[in-house]
Amino acid sequence: MIETPSLVDQYCHGVLRTELGLGTFEAHLARGEGPPAPGTTFFDTQTGFAVRRWCPPLLGLEPHCPPARYLARRRELGVLEAGRRLLRGSGITTYLVDTGLPGDLTGPDEMATTGDADAHEIVRLELLAEQVADTSGTVESFLANLAESVHGAAAHAVAFASVAGVRHGLALAPEPPGPGEVRGAAGRWLAHRSVGGTLTDQVLLRHLLWIAIASGRPVQLHAGLGEPGLRIDRTDPVLLTDFVRATAGLGTDLVLLHGYPYHRHAAHLAGVFPHVYADLGAELVRTGARAPAVLAEVLELAPFGKLLFSSGAHGLPELHVVGARLFREALARVLGTWVAEGAWSLADAQRVAALIAADNARRVYGLE
């Protein structure tokens, strides 16, 4: 039996503090641009089935119980108690929490308390830049405050996360933009944005990434499937190859988040470049019962010391549970098969499982 007693969730978000109805709950099971088609439900997805398999027992129900019964039990317990039972039942001992999403989500401290775990903050670069822009009156003050804010955040955050791929695409010019180019882009953006306006300018996105790289903190880059409406052909991690090559040898690790359906491309980059790591989050949660097959494809190419578990969860504590359970099940099945076939020893399988589950993340992020 392959065991993973400790899990470090190297990328997730907080959970909602409010009670959810059926429609709102369902919306978090899929990242679509609207509700399910008439006569259908998002519970009829791999993620929905995984929630029904793994979460009801943590709330005192039988596996695979109907969604209505599950949600009724959730409401009976209350959002706080249900969240506590789910997070503590996930087996996750450390959460790295991206605090850059809008909404009434718990932060690292609440995640630690609710889940009886350790928790650390991941700072989202684009949100930080938008907050700086809201309080900076001139281009000069914006650029100075931006650099100061990124380096100040590096003092307490374990990593930075970037959604440059979501905002623009990953085919970014690899070199840092020049000072004049940055000032021009900042001037145009500040002149036309209102308070809270989002950052999509590719020059400023690149500038932001290079400031973060100079801080030495790991930089997480969203790739593959993501926000509704996203053109995923623009988020293939292979598009980052030139940027990755340009950042080699600078002492900053890059972590390719999610990756699916380009998970083999992410695994390839992790195998080629010493400072690149691949995340195992979204591909397992999205593929559910097929997670072992997808995990095996990642393990074909990536060195085992370059892979990191995450749930990638957002909003629902159920997604933290599903991410952890599917990872454990998939890893045990894949590695257990290789042990049974004589390709691996049990000792090697157990060592690799510990690396991916927690030890790699502890090394990359400097966790105790």
Image (cartoon, rainbow, N blue to C red):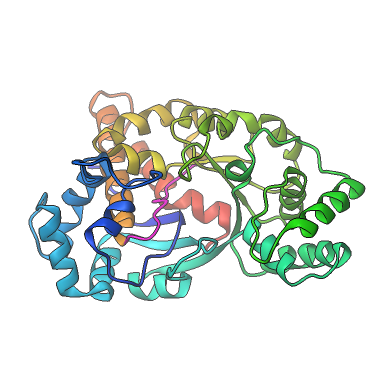
Quarter where residue 33 is shown: top left
For the residue pair 147 and 264, the one nearer the viewer reads as 147
Q: Please determine whether, in this image, residue 113 is positioned above or below residue 166.
A: below
Q: Residue 18, how many percent across, how many down?
A: 33, 72
Q: Residue at image x 27%, y 32%?
A: 290
Residue 285 position in % (x across, y down): 33, 44
Residues shaded magenta: 307-316
**Position of residue 4 in the picture relative to residue 65 (left or right):** right
Look at 40% across and 57% down and name the residue there.
314
Left or right: 204 in relation to 255: right
Q: Identify the main secondary structure in magenta.
A: loop
Relative placement, left or right, of 217 versus 176 is: left
Q: Is residue 97 magenta?
A: no
Q: Residue at x 34, y 69 (%)?
A: 115
Pinpoint residue 63: horizontal percent, then vertical percent.
Answer: 11, 52
Q: Residue furthest right?
A: 180
User: Which one is in front, 166 or 254?
Assistant: 166
Tag count: 0
Residue at (25, 39) in percent of width and height? 46
314 drawn magenta: yes
What percent of the width, then of the height, locates residue 328? Answer: 29, 46
42 or 209: nearer the eye? 42
Quarter holding residue 317? bottom left
One can see residue 101 in this view: yes
Viewer-closest of 244 and 61: 61
Q: Is residue 324 visible?
A: no
